Image: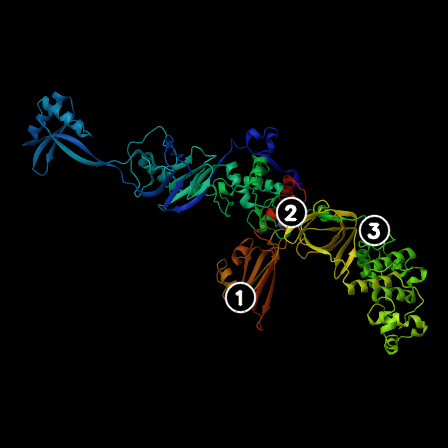
Amino acid sequence: MNLRNILFICAVFVFYCSKVSANEVFYLAAEPVIRIGLTTNARSVSITTTDSSLVAVSPDEPQKFLATNKISVSARSYRPPEFDVYYFEIPNIASLQEGDELAKDAREATKEKTFVKLDAKTNMWRVRIGERRETVEEANEFKKGLSEKGFETEIVTERIVQPSTDAVTLSRQIQQGGKTEVRSLIKPTGSSQPTSGEISANLREVMVSGASSTAKFSSLKSVAFGSINERAVPVRFNGKAYRGRIEVFVNSRGSLTVVNAVSLEDYLLGVVPNELSLPAIEAQKAQAIAARTYAVANIGQFGKQGFDLLPTVRSQVYNGHSSESRMGTQAVLETRGIVATYQGKPITAYYTSTCGGRTENSENIFEENEPYLRGVECSLEGKKHFEPFLIKTLRQPAKMRDDKNLKLVRLMSLFAVNGFQLNTAQLNDDWFEDEPTSSELSNWLNQLAVRFGKTFPNVTKDSAKPLELAGILAKFVYGDNYANTLLSEADINYQLAFDDAGEIPQNRRADVAILFRDGFFSLYPDLTLKPNKAFSRARMLRLIEQIYQQKKWFPILQTGASKSSENGKLVLRVGKTDKQFVVRADVFLLRQFGDDFYQVKEAALVGGETVNFQSNSLGEVTYLEIKPTTTTATAERMSSFTLWNTNLSPSAVQSRLSRYVRGIGSLIDVRIARQGFSRRAIDLEIVGTNGVFHLKGGKIRSALRLNEQLFALNKRYDSTGRATSYNFTGRGWGHGVGMCQYGAYGLAKMGVKYDAILKHYYT
Ligand SMILES: [Zn+2]
């Protein structure tokens, strides 16, 4: 199945997506507003701006300008308003019949409704005339009118309680709202205003208080606070700035929920830098699309609580305006409206910090089995992965068979960059075993003469023979006639105690002896010097090495830690700064394998290697040796979570597991029963005194509280076969499914574009 053809990256907004044919895309009518639940249990909330531009708005109401820069919001019990109403009654009527007659007269004279009632206190009858009046002025006016028509009434005051329209509507909303935990009015009340109805007990209202008169009010509706100058002066909740609005409403606990209602793209500005702060624009663009896709696919995730997403790792980390970054904003803008889709729907865009080298199939960690959430290698495939990091040389690497000559390759390379003539394009055993040419010999000995501050020796073909060489070297090292003068015959004989010492003529014995005494000359394996056999290049080089070492003339190589190299440019951390170096095309390039350095044609610097190098007067690197890093070579190697180690006691393992697996009894052992594609433990077998239990999928990580469930488990046992210690060595950080964030960074550094990064991880 070729899934790559099915995964699309497309724009979700109609106005942006017009070029893509309709069956490939997921359309939203417009940029959605995302509701982020900032707090779900606040008693008191502070809302501020840095200037006095606060506004408040509730459903179905005009925006209120608060004329202040600070308000506080709390919740309090709703008490329906109470007020006095006034009735008009003629008291003290002796009989019902009398009352009926009076009522009839009054009805005809005033055209008002009337009725007769018994006054229980006095046991006499009263006639009430007209409707109730709600103000004292109206009441007095009405009473006066009745009086003018001949009916003297007294005003009877009654106190009544009348819930507001909002209280009735809110009560209905709560009643019909199913499982919602929202206890403020959030839907518009619409045109049909209810005038009566039951109200719920314990209604609470949002109470706003600020310094200005418009900033003091209470509401049964949710109240959203914004800034009229949102871009320049964003609204702040408890001091922290947010784009969009801060909405406050009462929840089922009676406390306040605070929601940031913000447009999708503005929301992402406060997500991307928190989820991926690594400085590579293509990785941040991939992250922006993953985060946008996740948000769109999870609108309503916490709908019961009145918002869509949490600002934490449960959803995506969102820290509002102050966490925005220049590169994160660029990444969001450049991918505006784009989400990743599969068969026309936004994918479940899981992402994980550091996958540990391979991501895992979704069903092995979570319940869902998504065809685009397959485990993949966290790197480009095969050798291609290393291409951007390769340092190359035009120089032919040495071709060696003989172990004992191997070290000479490094030695000759070092001498060559320090002025010693090298007359071959490729080093090999034969070249080292041969005698130096007279041109080489002259050059090499002249190099020594310069170092010793002596005149150039007269070099001939014979100068490579120990007898000739001894004369030249003794002059260099000790000066004229030094050995002759200072060594006694006994000293000389003591040094020259090898088989063919008799072949050394008298006039050379002192020079040869002192060179042996000081460790410059050495013998062949058969205890001979072969005084008249010319030194091979190998012996000459070892001799010069000896001198250089004793005199401490070896060039001290510069040392640095490599940052990953890009396109052949060498970036090294030298001391406390990063420096970029130009590497000469014919650089002597060596790489360590085991204990030895080998000349190579190319070597990858993925970052973290120790390198020793020498550069010429132009600052070009002429010699470079690389000690490979022991850390991972995957794309995610910049993560500090690539390797970790955790030791747990059996009781710790038991207590952690027992929250997820009941009735283990006493823990005996824990084994990895099955591994997934990425070698993550996906089935943990738990052996307890009550039997064998299994813990599967992502719960393994949650239960054990490890960084990752990609681990090797090393245990110790007591004599009864019970594990006595558990050592988890693992890689990675996170759940291991979907896009690896550090891997995305690594790929971006290798020049991979955001769409290819997404397609790599969402296969
Ligand atoms: Zn990875």
Residue 746 got which mark? 2
Q: Quadrant of the N terminus?
A: top right
Q: Which mark is residue 396?
A: 3
Q: Residues within 10 Å of mark 3 (few under 14, many from 20)?
A: some
**Discs 1/2, front:** 2
- Would residue 649 be seen by someone viewing this image from the given angle? yes
Residue extending farthest to the left is 94
In the image: residue 721, left or right of residue 476: left
Q: Are marks 1 and 2 in contact (CB under 8 Å)?
A: no
Instruction: Tell me where residue 585 appears, x and y as whole percent.
Output: 79, 47
Whether residue 371 sits left or right of residue 657 in the image: it is right
Question: Is residue 58 left or right of 2 when viewed as pictured?
Answer: left
Q: Quadrant of the C terminus?
A: top right
Residue 264 drawn at (x, y percent): 51, 37
Q: Secondary structure at mark 3?
A: loop
x 77%, y 58%: residue: 597
Label located before the other in sequence (3 or 2): 3
Q: Which residue is mark 1?
A: 650
Give the CA separation, mark 1 to mark 2: 38 Å
In front: label 1 or label 3: 3
Along the line of sight, the residue nearer the viewer: 105 or 353: 353
First along the sequence among labels 1 and 2: 1
Asked if the residue at label 2 sits under 8 Å from ligand 1, the reply is yes
Image quadrant in which you'd find residue 187: top left
- Is any atom of residue 377 visible in this view? no
Q: Quadrant of residue 405?
A: bottom right
**Badge 1 element:** helix
Residue 247 or residue 667, whichever sits in front:
247
